[in-house]
Image (cartoon, grey):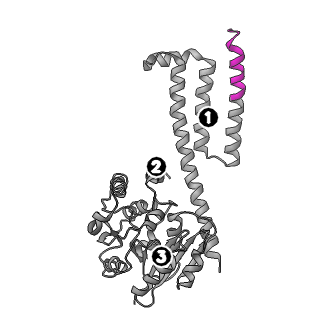
């Protein structure tokens, strides 16, 4: 057991339990669809594997020719952030459209 | 006699809306209505439009060009309107051109007509607008597969079939390009008719900002994934 990384792993695992529970609660109350729930579970499982077995990221990095495991994690995180930003923008556009529809209903309802 | 509705979206156009409505009314056949969608203006746009004889719908908050046109088309869909012409409030169009863009609709040769400003008035379009317009035309072709000579024209005509089928999802300037997406999706017949263009300092200050071009492009991309 590595006494330096163990507390960090413990903190990461506690955070992941929290993240899993949030995804589960949001899916249960219907705030996110089951597709999005599975997406988040997949992401958190990947993070959990990287936390518990950090040597696996190094093996993956070697296979991809990147060098260090931590670099793989950073690259994947950047791609994920781009994707999530894109999804957020789509969601904002949908919300704007909903506001427009509401505005229209109010405007057409006025005498 | 077929019923025409002219839709004029307007945001803070109190200075010119009365004149625009009055000029449009002088060229229109009897029984034509002019609908001004007052898009949350902070000035007297709604009052001036009503005074000039238009029907006015007031958006309580500003939603942008797409939101205003969507409201106008929805209003037309709910009534026995045979065809619709959209017309800019800022005075850049010649009211006589309403009849020109209506002609292919009346004769049954098109479902949607775009009044193109590039065929008669390319020389009058400022150079910066030419660049934005060329990029916009190219983007429309690339994203939606339709070649057009004026993807940002505000003078358009729609027959009843188009009024019923078109579903606008964008709220702002990108609606001009979105119409082409809808034309393709609904398999509507498109025709372009050359129209005059009258750029004034006022119309330039009110129209689409060049700096918005990037934002329009991004929003059109997002539109594809909604």
Q: Which mark is residue B191?
A: none
Quick check: A43 above or below B204? above
Question: On the image, numbered disc 1 is attached to which residue?
Answer: A41
B113, A32: nearer the viewer: B113
Q: Are marks 2 and 3 in contact (CB under 8 Å)?
A: no
Residue at point 33% right, 53% down?
Answer: B138
Question: On the image, numbered disc 2 is attached to which residue?
Answer: B218
Residue at point 35% right, 53% down?
Answer: B135
Residues under labels 1 and 3: Cα distance?
Answer: 49 Å
B36, A61: nearer the viewer: B36
Disc 1 and disc 3 on one polypeptide chain: no
Where's residue B155, x and y in %?
Answer: 39, 71
Question: On the image, numbered disc 3 is attached to which residue?
Answer: B7
Where's residue B213, x and y in %?
Answer: 43, 53
Q: Is residue B144 visible?
A: no
The boundaries of the magenta stretch are: A1-15
Residue A9 drawn in magenta = yes
Quick check: A83 above or below B53? above
Q: Is residue B113 visible?
A: yes
- Which of pointers 1 and 3 indicates the residue nearer the eye? 3
Q: Chain of mark 1?
A: A
When asked about the image quadrant of residue A23, the answer is: top right
| Category of crowding for the residue at label 3, using alpha-carbon neighbours closer than 10 angstroms: few (below 14), some (14–19), many (at least 20) | many
The local secondary structure at tag 2 comes to: helix
Where's residue A9, x and y in %?
Answer: 68, 19
The local secondary structure at tag 1 comes to: helix
Say whether residue B65 is left or right of residue A26: left
The local secondary structure at tag 3 comes to: strand
Say whether residue A63 is left or right of residue B145: right
Q: Chain of mark 3?
A: B
């Amino acid at each position: 057991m590595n006494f330096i990384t163990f507390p960090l792993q413990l903190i990461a695992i506690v955070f992941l339990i929290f993240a899993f529970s949030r995804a589960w609660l949001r899916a249960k109350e219907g705030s996110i669809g089951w597709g999005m729930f599975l997406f988040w579970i997949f992401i958190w499982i990947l993070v959990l594997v990287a936390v518990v077995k950090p040597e696996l990221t190094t093996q993956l990095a070697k296979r991809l020719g990147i060098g260090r495991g931590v670099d793989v994690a950073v690259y994947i995180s950047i791609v994920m952030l781009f994707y999530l930003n894109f999804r957020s923008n789509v969601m904002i556009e949908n919300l704007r459209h909903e506001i427009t529809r509401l505005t229209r209903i109010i405007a057409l309802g006025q005498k | 006699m077929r019923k025409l509705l002219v839709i004029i979206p307007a945001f803070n156009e109190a200075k010119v809306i009365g004149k625009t409505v009055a000029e449009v009314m002088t060229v229109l056949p009897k029984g034509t209505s002019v609908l001004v969608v007052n898009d949350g203006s902070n000035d007297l746009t709604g009052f001036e439009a009503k005074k000039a004889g238009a029907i006015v719908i007031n958006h309580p908050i500003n939603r942008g060009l797409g939101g205003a046109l969507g409201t106008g088309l929805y209003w037309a869909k709910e009534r026995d309107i045979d065809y619709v012409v959209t017309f800019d409030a800022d005075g850049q169009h010649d009211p006589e051109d309403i009849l020109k863009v209506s002609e292919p609709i009346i004769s049954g040769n098109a479902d949607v007509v775009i009044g193109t400003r590039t065929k008669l008035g390319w020389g009058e379009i400022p150079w910066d607008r030419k660049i934005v317009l060329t990029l916009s035309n190219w983007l429309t072709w690339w994203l939606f597969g339709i070649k057009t000579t004026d993807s940002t024209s505000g003078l358009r005509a729609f027959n009843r079939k188009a009024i019923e089928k078109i579903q606008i999802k964008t709220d702002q300037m990108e609606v001009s390009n979105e119409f082409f997406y809808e034309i393709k999706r609904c398999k509507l017949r498109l025709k372009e008719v050359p129209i005059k263009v009258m750029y004034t300092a006022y119309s330039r200050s009110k129209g689409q900002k060049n700096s918005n071009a990037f934002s329009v492009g991004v929003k059109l991309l997002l539109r594809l994934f909604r």
